[in-house]
Image (cartoon, rainbow, N blue to C red):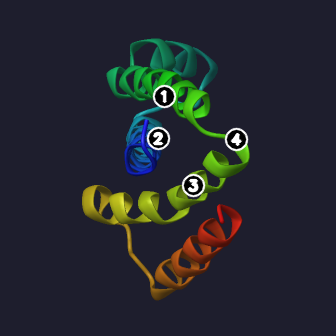
């Protein structure tokens, strides 16, 4: 895989993980925290099942990432999830998006850039 393709593949994998986080949040709202409700809620919650399936796919994708690039280059990109997840939470869950998210994301992107030089 070329450098650009590797970068796009890493970013796609991180985006898939972020989408899984949004689904975990949606699934958690529907959970009954009583013992009986929790067990059946975990087993019968289609959103949770989809979130776990997405994480399983993302894990396989991550293995392909790691096969094509060193861990010390690939892993810093996971920090981009700290920006992608709030953006998706804003877009799909109506959660507030604060300026601090952008400030933090700028610092994170700088850190990813520096650590992958």
For discs 4 and 2, the disc positioned in front in the rendered view: 4
Q: Which residue is mark 4?
A: 71
Measure how far apart labels 3 and 2 are at the Cα level.
12 Å
Q: Which residue is mark 1?
A: 55
> Of the residues under marks 3 and 1, which one precedes in the sequence?
1
User: Residue 77: which disc?
Assistant: 3
Number of on-image labels? 4
Q: Nearer the viewer, residue 11 or 92?
A: 11
Measure how far apart labels 3 and 1 are at the Cα level.
17 Å
The crowd level at tag 2 (other Cα within 10 Å; few <14, some 14-19, many 20+) is many
Residue at the (52%, 75%) spot, across then down: 105
What is the quadrant of the N terminus in the image?
A: top left
> Of the residues under marks 3 and 4, which one precedes in the sequence?
4
Query: Element type at marker 1?
Result: helix
Query: Element type at marker 3?
Result: helix
Q: Is residue 89 left or right of residue 82?
A: left
Query: Element type at marker 2?
Result: helix
The crowd level at tag 3 (other Cα within 10 Å; few <14, some 14-19, many 20+) is many
Q: Are marks 1 and 4 in contact (CB under 8 Å)?
A: no
Q: Are marks 3 and 4 in contact (CB under 8 Å)?
A: no
Residue at the (27%, 56%) spot, across then down: 92
Measure how far apart labels 4 and 2 are at the Cα level.
17 Å
Measure how far apart labels 2 and 1 are at the Cα level.
6 Å
User: Residue 17: which disc?
Assistant: 2
What is the quadrant of the C terminus in the image?
A: bottom right
The crowd level at tag 4 (other Cα within 10 Å; few <14, some 14-19, many 20+) is few
């Amino acid at each position: 895989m070329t450098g650009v393709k590797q970068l796009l593949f890493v970013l796609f994998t991180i985006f898939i993980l972020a989408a899984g986080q949004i689904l975990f949040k949606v699934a958690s709202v529907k959970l009954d925290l009583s013992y009986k409700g929790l067990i059946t809620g975990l087993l019968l919650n289609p959103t949770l099942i989809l979130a776990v399936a997405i994480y399983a796919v993302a894990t396989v994708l991550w293995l392909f990432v790691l096969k094509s690039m060193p861990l010390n280059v690939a892993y810093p990109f996971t920090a981009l999830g700290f920006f992608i997840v709030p953006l998706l939470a804003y877009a799909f869950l109506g959660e507030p998006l604060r300026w601090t998210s952008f400030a933090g994301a700028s610092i994170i992107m700088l850190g990813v850039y520096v650590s992958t030089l």
